[in-house]
Image (cartoon, rainbow, N blue to C red):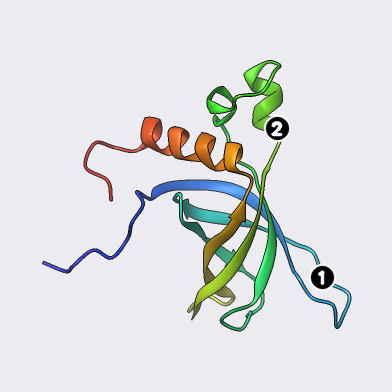
Amino acid sequence: MPSERRQFTRIPLGATVGFQELTFSSIPEPSESVFKDVSGGGLLLSSPREYPLGTLLKLEVRIPGWGKHQHTFGPASDKDARPLVAVGQVVRVEQMDAGGYELGIKFLNVYPDDWAALLKFIEATAPANAH
């Protein structure tokens, strides 16, 4: 049985994420993709181009259904429309057979209330035996 190094439960979620490199040396190129899964520690996304390990990305993660777990005023549907904004770091890059890349992104900086809402959403959504 393989040892599991993950600290957070991952859930599959084919939702969208906007991302761009955090850089001062060039004009960042915004991209939008689908992320394959998400956890409290990061996410796995598809990218049309490769990013070197260690690259910092600004992420705007759209998470359908997470609104009811946020502690802000207004209807949950309005809160669902608001993305989770985070800074993430590329920790894994894999070239896909069909073209493009799969990027493992570790969250480095997330607004604490958004992170708490994400963890509650994952706990409520994850199957009982997911890790």
The residue drawn where x is 71% and y is 35% is 82
Q: Amino acid at mark 1?
A: Glu
Outermost front residue: 112
Q: Where in the figure is residue 126, as x and y percent of width and height?
A: 34, 38
The residue drawn where x is 51% and y is 64% is 106
Q: Is residue 111 above or below residue 54?
A: above
Q: Where in the figure is residue 51, as x and y percent of width and height?
A: 64, 79
- The part of the image, by quadrant, that contains residue 77 is top right
Q: Is residue 97 above or below residue 1?
A: below
Visible residue check, residue 95: no
Q: Where in the figure is residue 46, as x and y percent of width and height?
A: 57, 65
The residue drawn where x is 47% and y is 51% is 38
Gap in Å between the C-alphas at discs 2 and 1?
23 Å
Q: Is residue 129 above or below residue 76?
A: below
Outermost left residue: 1
Crowd rating for badge 2 (residues with CA inside 10 Å; few <14, some 14–19, many 20+): some
Q: Return the residue nearer the eye: 8 or 113.
A: 113
Q: How many marks?
A: 2
- Residue receiving disc 2: 81
- The part of the image, by quadrant, that contains residue 88 is bottom right
The residue drawn where x is 67% and y is 15% is 75
Q: Is residue 64 above or below residue 36?
A: above
Q: Which mark is residue 29?
A: 1
Sequence order check, earlier mark of 2 and 1 = 1
Q: Amino acid at mark 2?
A: Ala
User: In the structure shown, which secondary structural element does the residue marked by tag 2 occupy?
Assistant: helix
User: In the structure shown, which secondary structural element does the residue marked by tag 1 occupy?
Assistant: loop
Crowd rating for badge 1 (residues with CA inside 10 Å; few <14, some 14–19, many 20+): few
Q: Return the residue nearer the eye: 87 or 48.
A: 87
